[in-house]
Image (cartoon, rainbow, N blue to C red):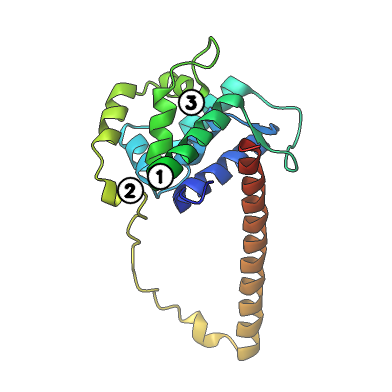
Amino acid sequence: MFERFSETLIKSIIVAQEEAHALGWFVVGTEFLLLGLLSTSEGIAARALKSQGVNFLDAKLAVQKKVGRGPGSGLHGTKFTPSAKTLLKNLALRAKVNNENISSRHLLLALLEIQNESVKPLGALEILREIKVDVRKLQSELLQVDESKIDMPLPPDILPKPYDPTDDALTLEQKIVQWEAEAELCRRVEREALIQADLCRKALADIIE
């Protein structure tokens, strides 16, 4: 059901879970989805938010102030709040019905379009207003985006590695030790990424139950 979500969007959902866990929450609300969108340098949502002066740190501090600390870790039971669940499910249904890919832009527009959660404003909207974002201007910018450029990675800075004379001084044995350490770090990062991806799949699966 979520196969048409872009890689950038999935990454932002994973980060949203991580940010919720860091504050001791086992449920992910729309304010955490907003943090997920801000966490990456990829995706039109992040660019649009940053063009309006929104940065990750300010938003994170506003979220911490709003939700406080939760009762503990929810690494093995992450779910979405009703509003976040409905929002993501609607995006997935849109992808299926219209046969279109869903990007971070679609998620941010959905966060901006929902005006309330019960009686109170939706979490993400409340955070944006708290940090003085012009929501209408942000919506306008998102609606004018060239669809062909959605969620394309920012071009990397391709610079040659500066010459380090100490490289020549390393013995083959030292280089092997260094390579092994780097390989183990990569494996650990990959394992952690797989765990987070699995948590994301389980949380998204809960939406369609």
Q: Earlier in the sequence, mark 1 or mark 3?
A: 1
Q: Amino acid at mark 3?
A: Ala
Q: Is residue 4 left or right of residue 52?
A: right
Q: Which residue is mark 1?
A: 103
Q: Specify the quadrant of the image occupied by residue 17.
A: top right
Q: CA distance from mark 1 to mark 2?
A: 7 Å
Tell me, for residue 150, which label it has, or none: 2
Q: Earlier in the sequence, mark 1 or mark 2?
A: 1
Q: Which residue is mark 3?
A: 124
Number of residues whose C-alpha sits closer than 10 Å to that of mark 3, classed few (under 14), some (14–19) or many (20 or more) = many
- Measured as percent of width and height from the top left, residue 166 is found at 51, 80
Q: Quick one: SS at disc 1?
A: loop
- Measured as percent of width and height from the top left, residue 126 is found at 47, 19
Q: Quick one: SS at disc 3?
A: helix
Q: CA distance from mark 1 to mark 3?
A: 17 Å
Q: Specify the quadrant of the image occupied by residue 152.
A: bottom left
Q: Is residue 104 left or right of residue 123?
A: left
The residue that appears at 40% across and 78% down in the rendered structure is 163
Q: Earlier in the sequence, mark 3 or mark 2?
A: 3
The residue that appears at 52% across and 35% down in the rendered structure is 88
